Image: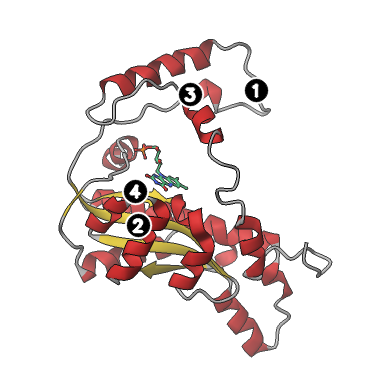
């Protein structure tokens, strides 16, 4: 057992303040290499990584995500679902590419991209860097598609801002395992006791942490998430389909 790996995983925190220092080409290559060595569904390597270095594109992504601090990061990746590359292979080989358009393959791309993203996170932290994953690029997936010139059968999934940490946020306590680790069957909660305890724990964390102190429990947090306008990201399904994904098994678009 490698305790240092476990210790690092158990002390992960997202970093949103960076020193103004760019990653080197070697660091970037190392991170991409680590991403590539992650498990990949059916060995199809159905995702790609775009390093965004153009200041105008970065600014546009800062606006889309609402995260201006990404401009201070030392490197910015966007991880995309990518069945386009395998479509090219299929076409060259004269194979029927239908399956590449299915929900199954879209999900496989999402799994691959997410696992590669986490490998980048873990590797970055092991290199003394800090990072934050950004699902908020999906606030405007159509603009992301245009900005990155994404062809059909690709889709933007996650941004990752990486850099030299300029703060050390306190660890966010996770829920008790009894709430999320079950044996054999899904376990419905017996009462609210565990959740109440976790709500108190999280409220204490938010009260005493260094920055952005607030009064918030886990239940408040979930309800706040539900309070966002319904039109935010409401175009996702249409946009995913317009990129050629999620064709149903009879061959017609759902
Ligand atoms: C799929 C995914 C999307 C995320 N998107 C964002 C984001 O858009 N902006 C952000 O600030 N953090 C984002 N995060 C980071 C989470 O907010 C963070 O992991 C969570 O609050 C737990 O905090 P910790 O990572 O510091 O433990 C994302 C994390 C994941 C896994």
Q: Is residue 52 visible?
A: no
User: Which of the marked residues, 3 or 2, is nearer the chain's N terminus?
Assistant: 2
Q: Tag 2: Cα neighbours inside 10 Å, few (<14), some, or many (≥20)? A: some
Residue 31 picture location, percent across and down? 31, 62
Give whichever of discs 1 and 3 has the lower sequence position.
1
Q: Is residue 22 above or below residue 94?
A: above
Residue 84 percent across, percent down from the top left: 57, 76
Disc 1 marks which residue?
Answer: 187
Q: Is residue 169 left or right of residue 151?
A: left
Q: Measure the C-alpha gap from mark 1 to mark 3.
A: 23 Å
Task: Using the numbered discs, state the Cα–Cα distance from disc 3 to disc 2 in whole angstroms.
Answer: 27 Å
**What residue sits 39% from the left and 54% below the top?**
119
Contact check, label 3 and label 2, Cβ < 8 Å: no
Ligand 1 is found in which quarter of the picture? top left
First in sequence, mark 4 or 3: give its number. 4
Measure how far apart labels 2 and 4 are at the Cα level. Answer: 13 Å
In the image, what residue occupies the spot 30% across and 31% down? 171
The spot of residue 169 in percent (x, y) is 25, 35
Q: Can you tell which of label 4 and label 3 is closer to the viewer?
A: 3
Q: Rounded to the nearest whole Å, what is the CA distance between mark 1 and mark 2?
A: 41 Å
Marks 1 and 4 sit apart, C-alpha to C-alpha, by 32 Å
Label located before the other in sequence (1 or 2): 2
Q: Which mark is residue 220?
A: 3
Q: Dot 2 corresponds to which residue?
A: 62
Q: In the rendered view, how is the structure colored? A: secondary structure
- Residue lying farthest to the right in this orientation: 250
The residue carrying pointer 1 sits among few (fewer than 14), some (14 to 19) or many (20 or more) residues within 10 Å by Cα, namely few
Q: Which residue is mark 4?
A: 132
């Amino acid at each position: 057992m490698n305790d240092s790996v476990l210790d690092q995983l158990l002390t992960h925190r997202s970093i949103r303040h960076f020193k103004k220092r760019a990653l080197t080409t070697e660091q970037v290559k190392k991170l991409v290499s680590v991403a590539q060595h992650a498990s990949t569904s059916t060995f199809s390597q159905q995702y790609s990584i775009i390093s965004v270095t153009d200041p105008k594109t970065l600014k546009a992504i800062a606006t889309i995500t609402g995260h201006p601090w990404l401009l201070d990061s030392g490197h910015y990746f966007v991880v995309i679902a990518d069945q386009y590359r395998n479509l090219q292979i299929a076409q060259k080989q004269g194979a029927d590419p239908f399956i590449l358009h299915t929900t199954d393959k879209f999900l496989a791309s999402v799994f691959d991209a997410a696992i590669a993203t986490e490998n980048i996170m873990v590797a970055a932290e092991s290199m003394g860097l800090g990072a934050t994953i950004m699902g908020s690029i999906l606030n405007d997936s159509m603009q992301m598609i245009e900005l990155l010139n994404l062809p059909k059968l690709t889709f933007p999934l996650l941004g990752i801002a990486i850099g030299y940490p300029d703060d050390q946020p306190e660890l966010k306590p996770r829920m008790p395992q009894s709430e999320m680790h079950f044996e054999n069957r899904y376990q419905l909660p017996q009462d609210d006791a565990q959740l109440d305890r976790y709500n108190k724990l999280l409220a204490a964390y938010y009260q005493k942490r260094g920055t952005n102190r607030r009064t918030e429990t886990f239940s408040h947090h979930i309800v706040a998430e539900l309070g966002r306008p319904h039109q935010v990201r409401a175009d996702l399904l249409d946009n995913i389909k317009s990129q050629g994904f999620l064709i149903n098994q009879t061959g017609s678009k759902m």
